[in-house]
Amino acid sequence: MIKLTDIRKAYNQGRDNEFWALNGIDLKIEPQRVTALCGPSGSGKTTLLTIVGCLARPTSGRVHLRERDISGLPERFLTEIRRSTFGFVFQQFNLIKGLTARDNVMLPAYPLGGDWRALHDRAESLLDTLKLGHRRHARVEWLSGGEQQRVAIARAMINDPEVVIADEPTANLDTALSREFMAILENLKEQGKTILLTSHDPLVVESAVVDTVVNLRDGRLVGAD
Amino acid sequence: MRTWIEKQKALIDFTLSSLARRKLKNLGLLLVYTLIVFILASVMLFTHALRHEAAQVLKNSPEVILQRMVAGRHDLIPPGYLEKLGRIRGVQKKEGRLWGYYYDAVVKANYTLMVPAAGAFTAETITDGSIVIGAAMARARGLTPGNLISFRSYSGRLFSFTVADVLPHSAELVSADLILMSEADYRAFFDITAGYYTDIALSVANPQEVRNIAIKLAETLPDSRPILREEVLRTYESIFNWREGIVLVLLSAAILAFAIFAWDKASGLSAEEKREIGILKAIGWETGDVIKMKFWEGALISLTAFLLGYIAAYLHVFRFSSALFEPVLKGWAVLYPRFELTPVMDGFQVATLFFFTVFPYTVATIVPIWRAAITDPDAVMRG
C-alpha cells in the first residue's frame, strides 16, 4: 500500500548544523497490518512517520501511496491526502485545550464541509465505542492521560482513514492503559485499518497485534522481522 | 455551494467555541471595541441629524435676506428701501422683517423678539399686548398661556404682555428663545419708528436665479448686504463640522489607545495559538482553512462590536437625546432647547465607520496567522 524508495531527509541542509535524519530507507507497508517502527531516540522513527503521513516531504527518494508517487506533490495536495487517508495519534496527544472532547474529535472533519448533524453523531458514536461517551462534554484538559489518548484516537478516526499513524502511543501511559491501547489497536486492525506506529516499548513491539517490526538506527533500517 | 456553506458554518462554530475559551479577554475586547464604535457613531449620527434638522428648518426660510450695513455693522433698513428695490425679475415676494434681541436679567438669558410674517399662523393669536413664546423660555420663566410678564425696554419703560400661547415642543430647536409680538408692540418696545425694518426677506422662485438677484440687489442698494440661504446652510455645516471635530479630537487619545490595544491583541500570536495552528494543520486543515477560521474570529468580534456600538449610538442619539455629548455638540445656552432629533442615517457615513472599524481589525487578525499558518505541519510531531 505504501512504498518508500531510498528515502533521505536532511534538516538545516546547507548550513553548519546540517543533519541527516534518514539515510536511504526502502520500505513497504502492507495494508491492513500493524507495522511498528522501533529504535532508540534519534534513530529517525518520527521523521519517517512524518514522511509517510504527508506531514513532510523527503529531501530525496520516492513515496508511493497505492502506486501513486506523492513525494513531489505541493502542500495543498498533501493536505488533501493527509486528511482523507491518514489519522494521527500524537505522542503528546495534541488536543486543543478549552474545547470539549467531542469538539476535538470533530476538528479534522470541519474543512470537509459535511453535514454537521451527521458529523456530530459520528463523533459521539466514536466516543461511545472508546467508552468515553460520558465524557464528551468535558474539556480535554480535565481528562486523564488515558482518556485524552482515546479522544486523540477518536479524532484520528473521524474521517474514517485507511491508515492510522501513532507516534509513541504508550509513552505517556501506565501498563494498564497501554494494554487498553493495544486492545483498541487490535480492534482497529479488525476493522481493516493499516496501522503504522513508532515505539520502543516492549509491550507494544512484542505484542501479538503487531505484524511487522522495523528497526531503525541512525536513519537506516537495521532489519525487518 | 452547500458544502461551502456547511464548511463556513463549521468554521464559525469552531471560532465561536474558540472565542468562548478566552471568554474574559474576548469580552473585554468586545466591550472596549463596542464603546469606541458607540462614541464615533454617536458623534456621527448626532451631527448628521443636526445638519439634517438645520437644513429642514432653513428649507422654509427666505432665499435672500437683505441687511443694511453702516460702518461694517448691521443697521436698520430706513424707510423707502423696500420701494427703492422696485420690481426685480424673479423675486416673488419682498417683505420688511422686524426682530431683535432682549437680555432678561432675571434668568440671564437672551430672547429673540420677532414680529411674525403677515399671514403666519400666529398672527391672529398675537394682538397688541399679547405674546407667543418659545417652550424653553416658558420653562425658564414658568409661564403658561394667560400669564402676564413684564420687560423693561432699553429706553427704561416697563412693558407688560399677556402670554397668548406657547410654541409647540416640536419646533423647539429654532424657537426655544423666541418671543413673537405684534408690530405695534415691537416698535414701541424697541423704540423703532414706522417704516424702519431690521432686514428685508426676499422669496425667489428659481434657485438658479438667486445669485443674479443678489448681484442686482448689491447694485441697487450698495450699502446693503444680501445673505443667501445656501450661505447660512454652509455656516451651519461648518459649525457642526467644527464641533464634531472638537469631540473627535478630544476622543482621539482614547481611540488611539484602543487602536494600539486592538492591533496588539489581533496581530500578536501567543505560543499557545501557534501550537494550535500547528495541530490544525497536522490533522488536515489547509493554510486557507486556518486563515478563514481566524478571519471569522476577527470578523465576528468586529462585526458584533460594530452592530452593538451602532445600535447603542442610535438609541443614545435618537431616544436619549445624546445625553453624553449634548453640551459640546449642540452648543451652550441658558435656554436650552429640548428636542428629539428625527432619526436619519447616511449610508456613506455608516460605510465609512464600518470600513475604519471592522476592516483594520479583521486584517490585523489575518496577517500574523498567515505567517504562522504557512509553517510545516511536521513541527507538531516534534513539539
Image (cartoon, coloured by chain):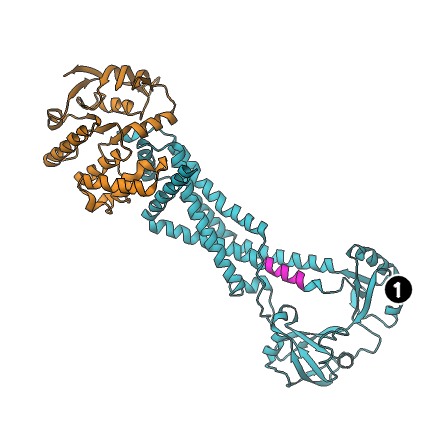
Question: Residue B343 location, x and y as percent?
Answer: 57, 61
Chain letter behind tag 1:
B
Residue placed most toward the observer, B29 or B16: B16
Horizontal arrangement in the rendering, residue A92 relative to residue B307 (left or right): left
Image chain in cyan: B
Which quarter of the rendering shows the C terminus of chain B?
A: top left
Q: Residues within 10 Å of mark 1 (few under 14, many from 20)?
A: few
Q: Kindly tell me whether residue B272 is visible in this rendering.
A: yes
Chain A on-screen colour: orange
Secondary structure category for the residue under label 1: loop
Q: Kindly tell me whether residue B267 is visible in this rendering.
A: no
Place residue B177 in its image quadrant: bottom right
Question: Residue B210 location, x and y as percent?
Answer: 79, 57
- The number of numbered badges drawn on the structure is 1
Magenta residues span B47-56
Place residue A182 in its image quadrant: top left
Secondary structure that dominates the magenta span: helix
Amino acid type of disc 1?
Arg
Place residue B191 in its image quadrant: bottom right
Residue placed most toward the observer, B351 or B13: B13
Looking at the image, residue B223 lies above or below residue A23: below
- Is B52 within the magenta? yes
Looking at the image, residue B278 lies above or below residue B60: above
Horizontal arrangement in the rendering, residue A39 relative to residue B238 (left or right): left
Residue on which disc 1 sits: B87
